[in-house]
Amino acid sequence: MKTNAMDLITAGRASFHPTDNSAGYSTQKEEGDRVSKLWSETKLPVWLQHFDKVAKRANEQPLAGGPNVTAADFAVFHVIDAVRKAN
């Protein structure tokens, strides 16, 4: 679960740095805007559907399962929070 959330974060960040992952967004803004828009329209919905299924299976328990909140639950929370703020 935590790996899934980190994969989404990594892929989302990479969409803003499509030509050079270590360079700043401002140096690749035009391409970054194009790629991140495409990623948000095609890949992000797939990820969100995945986490929606996980949440439904958790049945009001922490998403990673069990009675305690885990690092995976926090990772998913941050993903959802970032997506909400971006839209």
Image: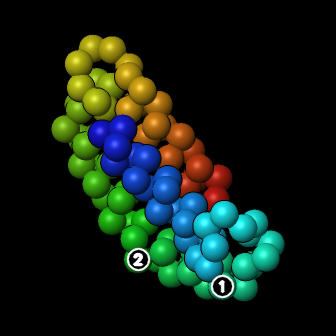
Query: Residue at the spot x=36%, y=38% of the render?
Result: 2
Position above or below: 12 against 68: below
Asked if disc 1 and disc 2 are in contact, CB closer than 8 Å, the reply is no
Q: In which quarter of the image is residue 76?
A: top left
Chain-order first, disc 1 or disc 2: 1
Left or right position of 19 against 56: right
Please, what secondary structure does the residue beneath circle 1 have? helix
Which residue is farthest top?
67
Residue 38 screen position, x and y as percent: 51, 81
Residue 28 screen position, x and y as percent: 73, 79
Residue 59 screen position, x and y as percent: 23, 31
Q: Quadrant of residue 25?
A: bottom right
Q: Nearer the viewer, residue 17 or 64?
A: 17
Give residue 31's mark: 1
Kind of residue sitting beneath label 1: Glu
Query: Residue at the spot x=55%, y=66% of the render?
Result: 14
Quadrant in the picture for the N terminus: top left
Position above or below: 60 against 66: below
- Work out whether residue 7 can be spotted: yes
Q: Which of 62 and 25 is in front in this view?
A: 25
Kind of residue sitting beneath label 2: Thr
Give residue 4's mark: none
Give residue 42's mark: 2
Q: Residues within 10 Å of mark 2 (few under 14, many from 20)?
A: few
